[in-house]
Image (cartoon, helix red, strand yellow):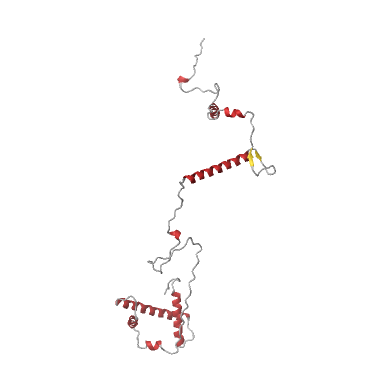
Amino acid sequence: MAGPSHATPYPVYRRVLQAAVSAICLEQGFGSCDATAMETLTEMLQATLTEICHSAKAFAELGGRTEASAPDVCLAVADMGVRLEGMREYIRRPGKIQVSTPGIQTRVSTPRTLQAGERKNLPSHIPDHFPPFPDSHAYIRTSTHRQPVTEYVAIREKVASQKRDIERALTRFVAKTSGTQTLFPDNPTLYPLIACKPSPQPWLVALEPKDQVFEDEEDDDKEEMGVPERGEGLQQPDNPYLRGVKMPRRRF
């Protein structure tokens, strides 16, 4: 007979039945017992008790009850053909061997390696035998992004901070790529300043128009596109109306 999985208390019940069979064998005068015989007797005792329990449950349900009582058990034993006359004397016999009650082993709970948040207790309308709630992140919805800041003061402060960072980064870049001056001769890297390049005609920069410079841009575009100069590498167009005049040959 194949037993249930090890997650059930089946092995414990099986050991209790083996202890009861061993006690009965000792009372009858046996000093030892073969393992096969012990397993057979235990299987017979288990089958008998299982059949009695099933019959007692059937009698209880027939009487409209959910739990079996003593009369139901007596009817189940009598239905199997076992006489009940000497049952009381056998139970109260002298010198019987008492089978010790199996000890209750405390269940060791496995500690959780990772627990996010605090677990909530079960509400009053949920029975206590139900499993507890899982971690809060498993069923509570949380937003994955923050709402954008729309306050005017906060936006202005953020823009000013970004502008300050950009100016500082640009200043450091120019200071590293060009000449610098320092206020501390002993340590030139302490507070570098961008070196000023003197111009012989500083007033000329203010007079030159820098906003709209078209001629320089056109010259640059011609150089990039490779526009040939006049008379260099000219090709005849395909349009006959645009071709140059071709003088006929003189015949002598």
Residue at position x 47%, y 20% in the image: 242
Q: Residue furthest left?
A: 63
| Residue 137 spot, x, y in % from top left | 45, 59
Looking at the rendered image, the quarter that the N terminus falls into is: bottom left
Q: Establish if 48 lies above or below 197.
A: below
Q: Quadrant of residue 177?
A: top right
Q: Residue furthest top?
A: 252
Q: Is residue 59 left or right of residue 200?
A: left
Q: Establish if 140 lies above or below 212.
A: below
Closer-to-camera residue (71/31):
71
Q: Establish if 222 lies above or below 8.
A: above
How many numbered markers are drawn?
A: 0
Residue at position x 61%, y 39% in the image: 174
Residue at position x 47%, y 80% in the image: 35
| Residue 248 spot, x, y in % from top left | 49, 14
Q: Quadrant of residue 37?
A: bottom left
Closer-to-camera residue (246/209):
209
Q: Residue furthest bottom?
A: 94
Q: Residue furthest front?
A: 153
| Residue 97 spot, x, y in % from top left | 46, 86
| Residue 88 spot, x, y in % from top left | 38, 87
